[in-house]
Amino acid sequence: MCGIVAYIGDDKAGPILFDTLKRLEYRGYDSAGVAVISQGSVEVLKSSGRIVDLEKTYKSMGSPGEGMGIGHTRWATHGRPSDINAHPHTSGEIAIVHNGIIENYLDLRELLTEMGYEFQSETDSEVLAHLIHFYYKGDLCAATLKALEKVEGSYAIAVMAASSPYIVCARYESPLVIGKGSSSVFVASDVPALLPYTKDIIRLKDGNIARIYADRIEVMDCSGAPLESEVERITWDTDAAEKGGYPHFMLKEIHEQPRAIRETIAGRISEIDGDVRLSLGISEEEIMSLERVTIIACGTSYHAGMLARNLFVRAAGLPVDVEVASEFLSLQLRPRTLLVGITQSGETADTLLALKKAKTCGGRSLAITNVVGSTVTELVDGTIFTRCGPEIGVAATKTFTSQMVAVILLAIRLGRARGHLTPDQARKMLIELTKLPGLVQRVLEKREEIRKIAEMFAGASCYFFIGRDYLYPISLEGALKMKEIAYIPSEGYAGGELKHGPLALITEKTPVVALATCGKKIQSNIKEVRARGAEVIALATEGDPDIAKVASKVIELPETRPIYSAVLCTVAVQLLAYYTANKLGLPIDKPRNLAKCVTVE
């Protein structure tokens, strides 16, 4: 997630911009930049790399600028991390910083190019600078409103012009807050940047635009009509604010999943055509000739790959092999196989080595990753970026659900290209997919119910997770989460495998989490463990008339297509593991012996 800051007031803008940007470093970034008004013109300083290095350059230049400026930390989505792709972007006397994704930027870029505008970067954000410049006739707010009418997608922006006495900011599906000082106003993507300067903030709502002066803030709706704005008093300390008021990054990132899923989907769905827009680096003829898919990954990413095993057969008619990356070096790829590497960081050593080995066998390859410019992108023919922003907690949460959504998008894309899915079938899947963020939000609203259950079983010496079909990989993921952060030995099994050995471990002290949203067969497995005295926590579809008869505790989840139910169950088991670890007083964000990115074999 990128970070936006802006300042207007009596003090010099530059030092404040750098200080506020540093307070957003926890969000992750690959480049940074500031723009300040200096002697009647806009002066921009930006580069890839660290804020502290950029600040040194700024000071070596004599710390230029007056009392107005904007700043940005960039997490690359469109275009590699580089000096030229860093924000702010300019057009004439206009400078902007932008978070979000402009879905129709290619169409806008083509239109603006025809109008004579020259693009310097690869980013979607630069189109906004040129659009606002085109409409600017002395009224920056009016120009910004007209430009935003042309935009499809999500955005949080701060805009300034050398000849304008105010800064404009606006948001849609991307956070932005305004801080009110005594003779100054601050803007930021998140509260932590503002706390040293003010604790009185205004949270812009979707579709709002604001004109900010040093002594006042004017908030409007998307038509320019004035709105009353509520000033909120922040009581958090700085550490809590970085976590958005949550006690741990993991809980914050669990709650960010509706937005993370929206970002993964954004601009990639055509409900009219019943298709998915993905640049795979593979021709339609090559897709038609595929006979198999091989997925390689580690840890949680491996579980995302396992989800594809049944999905790709059903959606695209393609059998799938899913391999642990560290075991892949002894294997050979079959002809006409598409190789897919899944890695959150794009730097996982075992996955990279396996991809290098597999590439010697020929064939096409893809990566699913969250990090633009990571090493994995150099090894493959095409990349699907999950675009869910940096994840601070060691245990994967939003990156996993975004990987699952990326796998679903890929399955639909392959299915349509191969004629295995009709437009109507794909359209129905895509319409339901767009509803998934809202369904995830409904699961999050059950957090207190899940917390009470977690605390009830926090003293367990071991846990079992069982599931069938799409939910078998989620049973493995649930067990992994319980092991990672709660340090409770846990096992995940396909429900039908219990009778082949694992039942010997079941006692009345063994809580069993049954993922029961994909059919009735799991109920016989629930009865098996109940007969041996185990307590069963069932994740079931709302209104299921039978599950309460066999389970000890039932957490009802919204009804949806089975493949999407896997995402909902994931969120529930994440919360279960989190609240268990929290009850035990464990270091949730930094579990012992584990690292966020495994860059060694």
Image (cartoon, helix red, strand yellow):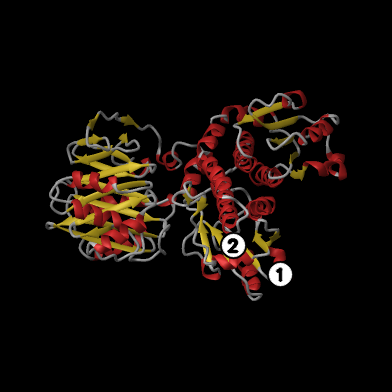
Residue 78 visible, this orientation = yes
Q: Residue at x 36, y 60 (%)?
A: 123
Q: Is residue 200 left or right of residue 323?
A: left
Residue 248 visible, this orientation = no
Circles 2 and 1, Cβ within 8 Å, touching? The answer is no
Q: How many marks?
A: 2
Residue pointed to by mark 1:
334
- Quarter location, residue 169: top left
At label 2, the amino acid type is Thr
Which SS class for mark 1? loop
Say which mark, if any, is on residue 346.
none
How far apart in space, not on screen, are marks 2 and 1 (Cα)? 24 Å
Q: Nearer the viewer, residue 39 or 172?
A: 172
From the top left corner, tell me how far across and down residue 8 is, in percent. Answer: 20, 45
From the top left corner, tell me how far across and down residue 82 is, in percent. Answer: 38, 66
Residue pointed to by mark 2:
348
At label 1, the amino acid type is Arg
User: Quick check: 182 above or below 277?
Assistant: above
From the top left corner, tell me how far across and down residue 349 is, in percent. Answer: 61, 65
